[in-house]
Structures are given as C-alpha cells and as structure tokens.
Image (cartoon, rainbow, N blue to C red):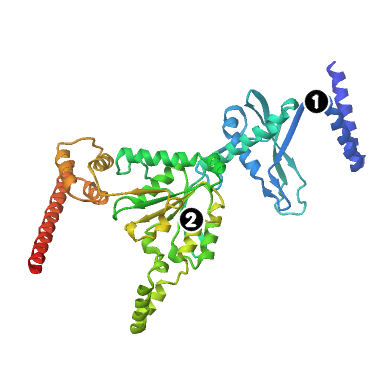
C-alpha cells in the first residue's frame, strides 16, 4: 500500500512540474481561476488577505500594522513559533507569529483564524548581496454565514484595538518648535498625581476630568464639537504647574508639544505647527502672559498714543520694542489656534496654558470653551506638605508635624521651597534636621510677614494724619 501511494504522489508531482514548466501562463491563470470558483461551491469559508505593503510606492499598510499589534498577545499564548523585534519608537519587545503559523480568535461567540504567510519573489541574479523579495501578509478565515458580523464589527474592533495597543506601547515624546518645525526628545518625566503636592480631593477631581475626556470620543462626535479640552493652570512661581502637565501626560499616555510662541513668525506658521501635532497629545504654552503682548491690540487709544509719543522721544526704546515684536502672532491667530476651524484637525488633544498672573490675560483667551477648566495651584498647605514628606522622607507622621501645620496656616510658602528643605543634601542629614530647617524657614517668613504688616499699618497711620 505504501509503495502504491508513493507512486501516485510521484506521478502527481511529475504532472504538476510539467504543468508549471510547459503550460502557458495565461492558461494556468484560467485553470486556477475556475478551480477556485468550483471550490467555492463546496468550501464554506471566506478568506481575507491583508498585505504588509500596499499602493504604488509600497507604503507599509496601517491595517497590517494594527493587526500585528492586535495579534501580539494571542500569538504569544498560542503560536509555537514566534518572531521578536524592537520596533522604532516602541518601548518594549514586540512578539508576532512566525511565517505560516496560525492562531484562533473569538468574537461574539464566533471562532475565526488568523494565519501569517509570505510571497517570495525572484532574487537579483547579478547583485553582490542577493536579497529575496518577501511580501508578508495576514490571512483571516471565517465561516461564510458570519460575513456581515466579521466584515463590519469585528474588523473595526481589530483595527481600533490594534491602534490602541500601538499607542500604549509607543515611546512617548516631548516636542519643541524651532521655527515652523517640531523636534523631539524621549519624554521620561517621572511625575504622577500620586507624588503631586496637592489636596487629595482636588487631585481626584482633575484625574476624573482627564480620564472622562479621554474616553469621550463618541460624546464629542454626537454634540458636534472638536475632541479637545483646554486647561488653564495659574498660581505663583514654584507651585507645580510644569509638574502638573507631566503628571497629566503620564496619566493619559500622551505626548507633549511645548510651543514657544516667540519662535513662531506669524499666524500661518502657528497654523502649520498645529496641523503637524498628533492626536493623544498635550499642547503646552507656558507663561503665556510673558510669551507675547497678546493684549496690546485691545488697549485704549490713549495708551497707544502715549506709547507712540514715547517712541518718538526715545528711539532706543523703539528699537527694543520692535525686536521684542519679531513674532507677528496676533491674539486673533492664537484664538483660532485654540478653537477655530483648524483646531478640529486631529483629535484627543489637550491645550494647556500656564501663567503666574491670570489677571493679565485677555478674557477672550481664557473664557469657557477655550480654557474649559481653570486650576489654581496655590501655596503649600498641610495636605500638600504631607505628600512631600511621604515623597522625600517616606514618612506619614512625625512629632514636628503639628508645629509645621500651625505655621503653614499663617505663612505663605510654595511647595518648591518646602521640598528644598526636605531634600537630603548630605548623607548624615537626618529627618529631625530637615524638619527643623523647614520650621526655622517658616518662622523667619512669619516674622518678615508680621514686620511688613506693621510697616504697612504705620504708613497708613501717617498718611491719615497728614490728610487731617
């Protein structure tokens, strides 16, 4: 029986070799075409192929890349042969199934199969280093009675999940603008909301707001608004505005675009920078009250006239003003950047302004709809101090905490100043020394504060007597 089967296989192989060698290519194409049609009558499964490269320029297919990411977890648990690679801009090793492997998947109770394969083309005969032309693909197989379920809901689910996995695994970046172009470095800031010196209730409110925004794509689409949200962070220097931005980026897994307005030539260049930002990002303009004179267009005519007279009398002042106004970005251009038609390009973006003096900003710039949420970062309270003590000294309580709590109620000090005293500067510096140093600084600040109050009261009393 074995010898009989062997002779049959040998005959079939001989016939196939003759067919491949001598039959015309067009004739072979017809045979394959009609044999596939004949097979479709008895074969109950449908197959969809996703090629790695598509188009005339052979660009890597986004669908193939998303499927590869989607199947990475399934492949690592089911496939016996895997490929491992470090993809550009990816934080971790990416596992995918090797060629000619197959894994199963399930969607709404329907089982289907994914297989990987490749087409091998001809090699260049006269090349010094012959390279095989390999075109890989994924093939999806499922029963034909589930066609509608697989083609619409399932494939959308695969592409959406695959892109989400790619975003989670990507190496996040911090961008800055040099003229009309962005350059970047790897974003590795360790700040989180757990280490942020702020009252716990306020932190939870901000975190809930951010997470709700990141999951609200369908809501923004339904109400007809661009998927973006503005945050205004204001407060004295050293209260943690930049740290808050880093914590927001780490919570949501977003990139950061740090926009320097003074390096932008005009409104057109600003619009170009906006278009080149990606989704899942935070666009930051720090110290916006110092970036440009954005309120100059709304000043009274008398104030502008006085400035013009001063320019005539002092030419040097005029030169310095013109140098400061090398950027032609206007308030109107910035407002369009925030919520104009061009702001809808892309989605899932936060726009964050920081300022030390919120009263200096034009009301049109910070109204609701542009800066949707205003967050005040103020001086250090006792709750914020306890977070800093936990971060720097790993302490939840200490006998000196009571004295520090009383002083913090009476003295205004920033979290940055408190952190400086809690920072161990020598190997021999113990906890007691750090807290005593902080108490001494708070008492000195209290004395200076009381002295200022006395001086102010004395001046007011003298002025009242002189009036009388």
* Alpha carbons under labels 2 and 1: distance apart: 56 Å
Q: Residue at x 34, y 57 (%)?
A: 358
Residue 45 lies, in percent from the top left, at 76, 27
Of residues 14 and 353, the one drawn nearer to the viewer in this rendering: 353
Secondary structure beneath disc 1?
loop
Q: Quadrant of residue 400?
A: top left
Dividing the image into 4 quarters, which one contains the C terminus?
bottom left
> Does 92 sit left or right of 153 as displayed?
left
Residue 40 lies, in percent from the top left, at 83, 28
Q: Residues within 10 Å of mark 2 (few under 14, many from 20)?
A: many
Dividing the image into 4 quarters, which one contains the N terminus?
top right
> Which disc, if any, is residue 338?
2
Instruction: Answer yes or no: is residue 276 visible.
Output: no
* Residue wearing tag 1: 43
* Above-or-below relation of 300 to 431: below
* Above-or-below relation of 441 to 65: below
Of residues 73 and 436, the one drawn nearer to the viewer in this rendering: 436
The total number of labels drawn is 2
């Amino acid at each position: 029986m074995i010898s009989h089967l062997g002779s049959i296989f040998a005959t079939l192989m001989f016939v196939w070799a003759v067919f491949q060698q001598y039959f015309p290519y067009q004739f072979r194409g017809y045979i394959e075409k009609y044999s596939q049609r004949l097979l479709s009558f008895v074969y109950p499964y449908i197959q969809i192929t996703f090629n790695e490269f598509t188009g005339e320029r052979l660009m890597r297919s986004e669908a193939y890349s998303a499927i590869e990411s989607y199947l990475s977890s399934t492949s690592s648990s089911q496939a016996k042969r895997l490929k491992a690679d470090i993809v550009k801009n990816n934080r971790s090793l990416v596992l995918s199934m090797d060629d000619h492997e197959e894994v199963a998947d399930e969607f709404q109770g329907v089982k289907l199969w994914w297989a990987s394969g490749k087409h091998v083309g001809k090699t260049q005969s006269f090349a010094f280093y012959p390279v095989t032309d390999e075109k890989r693909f994924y093939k999806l197989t499922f029963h034909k009675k589930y066609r509608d379920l697989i083609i619409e809901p399932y494939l959308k689910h695969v592409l959406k999940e695959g892109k989400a996995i790619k975003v989670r695994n990507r190496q996040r970046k911090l961008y800055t603008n040099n003229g009309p172009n962005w350059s970047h470095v790897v974003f590795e800031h360790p700040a989180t909301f757990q280490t942020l010196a702020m009252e716990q209730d306020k932190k939870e409110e901000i975190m809930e707001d951010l997470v709700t925004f990141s999951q609200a794509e369908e809501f923004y689409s339904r109400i007809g608004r661009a998927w973006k949200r503005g945050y205004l962070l204001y407060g004295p220097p050293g209260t943690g505005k930049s740290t808050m931005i880093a914590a927001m980026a780490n919570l949501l897994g977003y990139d950061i675009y740090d926009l320097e307005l003074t390096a932008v030539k005009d409104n057109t260049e600003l619009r170009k920078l906006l278009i080149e930002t990606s989704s899942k990002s935070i666009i930051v303009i720090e110290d916006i009250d110092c970036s440009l004179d954005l309120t100059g267009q709304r000043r009274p005519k008398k104030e502008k006239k006085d400035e013009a007279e001063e320019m005539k009398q002092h030419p040097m002042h005029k030169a310095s003003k013109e140098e400061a106004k090398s950027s032609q970005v206007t308030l109107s251009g910035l407002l369009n950047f925030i919520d104009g038609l061009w702001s809808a390009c892309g989605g899932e973006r936060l726009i964050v302004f920081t300022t030390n003096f919120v009263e200096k900003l034009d009301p049109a710039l910070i109204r609701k709809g542009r800066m949707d949420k205003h967050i005040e970062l103020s001086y250090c309270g006792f709750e914020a101090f306890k977070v800093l003590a936990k971060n720097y000294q790993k302490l939840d309580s200490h006998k000196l905490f009571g004295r520090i709590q009383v002083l913090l109620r009476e003295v205004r000090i920033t979290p940055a100043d408190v952190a400086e005293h809690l920072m161990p500067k020598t190997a021999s510096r113990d906890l007691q020394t750090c807290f005593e140093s902080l108490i001494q600084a708070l008492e000195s600040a209290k004395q200076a504060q009381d002295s200022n109050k006395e001086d102010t009261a004395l001046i007011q009393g003298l002025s009242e007597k002189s009036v009388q």
